[in-house]
Image (tube, grey):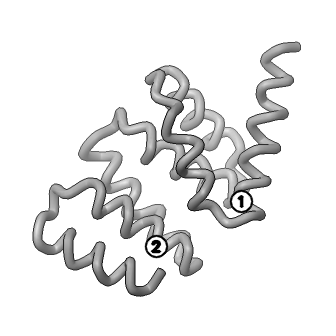
Amino acid sequence: APGVYQLASLLVELDASDEPSRILCADALYQMGCVEEAHKLLLLALSRNPQRSPILARLALLQLKKGFVYDGNQLLNKVIRIGDTSCLLPIMDIFKDEDRKLMQTHCHFRALTILK
């Protein structure tokens, strides 16, 4: 993760508008345990493109991880409204095991609530 972060940071320095490098940078920060820094980077990326499901889904996990269930739900609802949920499975590979379980459990319980 540190090497990925350094490479992604260099790419962002070369082109500040390079969204994939910014997301890669945030993913590396998350993997290194720098959740707040990853959150800030994702918020910056979201401000440039508020309809990007991969960014919204990552932010949803970070909100759930912090215990902000309402905010996490709002972000997940936005991903669903956009209609691009294809990003969720690849992102799940990036999440740490405990966070993957948190997201899966949360989504499962939300789905059950909606069905009821």
Sort mark 2 into few (<14), some (14-19) or many (20+) by Cα contacts within 10 Å: many
The residues bearing labels 2 and 1 have C-alpha atoms spaced at a distance of 15 Å
Locate residue 81, reporting x and y percent.
50, 20
Q: Helix or strand or loop: what does disc 1 sit on?
A: helix
Q: Secondary structure at mark 2?
A: helix
Q: Left or right? Give the position of 18 relative to 25.
A: left
**Residue with the most extreme top position:** 116
Tell me which residue sits at (52%, 51%) in the image.
58
In the rendered view, tell whether residue 33 sits above or below residue 90: below
- Residue highlighted by disc 1: 99
Question: In front here: 113 or 86?
Answer: 86
| Numbered badge on residue 11 | none
Q: Residue at x 38, y 64 (%)?
A: 24
**Amino acid type of the residue tagged 1 in the rendering:** Asp
Residue under label 2: 28
Residue 67, given in percent of the width and then of the height, sits at: 73, 55
Q: Position of residue 10 (x, y in %)?
A: 21, 78
Q: Is residue 32 above or below residue 11?
A: below
Report the amino acid beneath label 2.
Ala
Residue at (77, 63) in percent of width and height? 98
Query: Please, is residue 115 above or below residue 91 in the view?
Result: above
Instruction: Depth check: give the residue in front, 21 or 17.
Output: 21
